[in-house]
Image: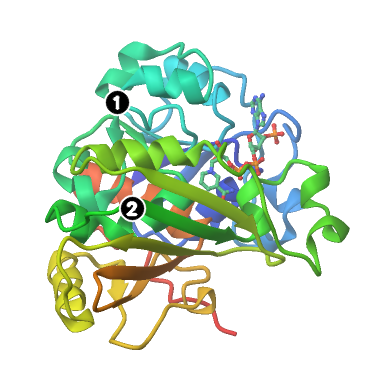
Amino acid sequence: MLNVGIIGATGYTGVALISLLINHPLVKITLVTSNTYKGKRISDIFPLFRGLFEETLVPTDDDHGDKCDVYFLCLPHGTSMATAKTLFNDKSVLIDLSADFRFEDLSIYEKTYIKHIAPELAKQAVFGLPELYKDKIRGAKIIGNPGCYPTSAILAFYPLLKEGLLSGDIFIDSKSGVSGAGRDTKIGSLFCEVSEGFRAYNVGLHRHEPEIQKEVNKYQDLQVMFTPHLLPMNRGILSTTYSRLKNPYKTSDILDLFKKTYKDEPFVRIMDEGVYPDTRFTRFSNFCDIGLKTFEDGRIVIISTIDNLIKGASGQAIQNMNVAIGIEETLGLKTPPQYP
Ligand SMILES: NC(=O)c1ccc[n+]([C@@H]2O[C@H](COP(=O)([O-])OP(=O)(O)OC[C@H]3O[C@@H](n4cnc5c(N)ncnc54)[C@H](OP(=O)(O)O)[C@@H]3O)[C@@H](O)[C@H]2O)c1
């Protein structure tokens, strides 16, 4: 059995991790932390865990080094890298859900976020998008789990990028449910501020654009333009990506390329021609669904959906753990999407 610790277990991603890991056949959650709720049972804060998982929360700020085989860090950026420094050792695997270990080039991280205080760890970190980097994730000791929007966007155009087929800039129009902002009180996330409305936010400023751009730069010299929107729903992301192909292709040919690229990937589902993804069919699951259409003049539109808390965060983190440790990639992640 793997002893697993969830650092920052009281946020949305921490709760999603517990919900998934209590059904993982090779995992025992032995550590859950919170500064705000230390000393309380997690099931007292979140009654959904009554009778299922009733561990007591211990302070995040205590020293938890050497206690677990795997640590999931579900903390805000900045806090995460400080904690990672105290937890890192030869025996454990650290999987960070914040942005702190997603950037190979720390100058981009520092321009986008803050000064990095653990550059020696960042150098060893692997960007944890298993569909692209499985070989590097195997055996990795520290993994930077990708952002939710970047996961939905990069998977949507990776097959084209890899083959060098794109010729135009990439426009990504993403819509997310409110849980993407975390559980902290924020005015913009209050019911009356979100329900019955639909708005773009952080236009031209969102921190996930550099994360997507640095992945694009590895393959083709193309500019990304990313605009996030807030949808009045709890969870889910739908990204619509527009670009241009170097030559016109039939929709069926590009769908075949996507199916071939992802044929060994258990969590990417390519829709048939004329069928497009719907957030209702990826909710609570680790799937990314992708549908697309090409046009005679070379334009292409690609639509992808994920659950921001599962494939966009905690599910992908478990997928990364499974790959890193060398166990079956889908363990603990076989939950089908929950419908309706
Ligand atoms: N929400 C998403 O869809 C999503 C998707 C991908 C990645 N992420 C990233 O995953 C991380 C966690 O996100 P989340 O949505 O779970 O956030 P959240 O709901 O706001 O929870 C944050 C957690 O961090 C703890 N925390 C906050 N400030 C802290 C500090 N200064 N020191 C120590 N602990 C602190 C909180 O614990 P206390 O109980 O002690 O207050 C809580 O457990 C973030 O970096 C986020 O950007 C989130």
- Give x and y (percent) for residue 195: 80, 66
- Give x and y (percent) for residue 323: 23, 48
Q: Are marks 2 and 1 in contact (CB under 8 Å)?
A: no
What whole-number distance in Å separates the C-alpha atoms at marks 2 and 1?
Answer: 17 Å
- In the displayed structure image, the side of residue 111 where residue 270 appears, left or right: left
- Asked if ligand 1 lies within 8 A of label 2, the reply is no
Residue 235 tag number: none
- Give x and y (percent) for residue 208: 48, 41
Position of the C terminus, as image quadrant, is: bottom right
- Going by the numbered disc 1, the residue's amino acid type is Glu
Q: 26 and 228: which one is in front? A: 228
Q: Which residue is mark 2?
A: 154
Q: Residues within 10 Å of mark 1 (few under 14, many from 20)?
A: some
- In the displayed structure image, the side of residue 97 where residue 258 appears, left or right: left
Mark 2 or mark 1: whose residue is earlier in sequence: 1
Mark 1 lies on a secondary structure that is: loop
**Residue at position x 22%, y 54% in the image:** 167
**Residue at position x 53%, y 56% in the image:** 309
Q: Which residue is mark 1?
A: 104
Q: 203 and 32: which one is in front? A: 203
Total numbered badges shown on the rendered structure: 2
| On screen, residue 296 above or below 1 | below
Q: How is the structure coloured here?
A: rainbow
Judged from the image, the quadrant occupied by ligand 1 is top right
- Going by the numbered disc 2, the residue's amino acid type is Ile
Q: Quadrant of residue 232?
A: bottom right
| On screen, residue 106 above or below 230 | above
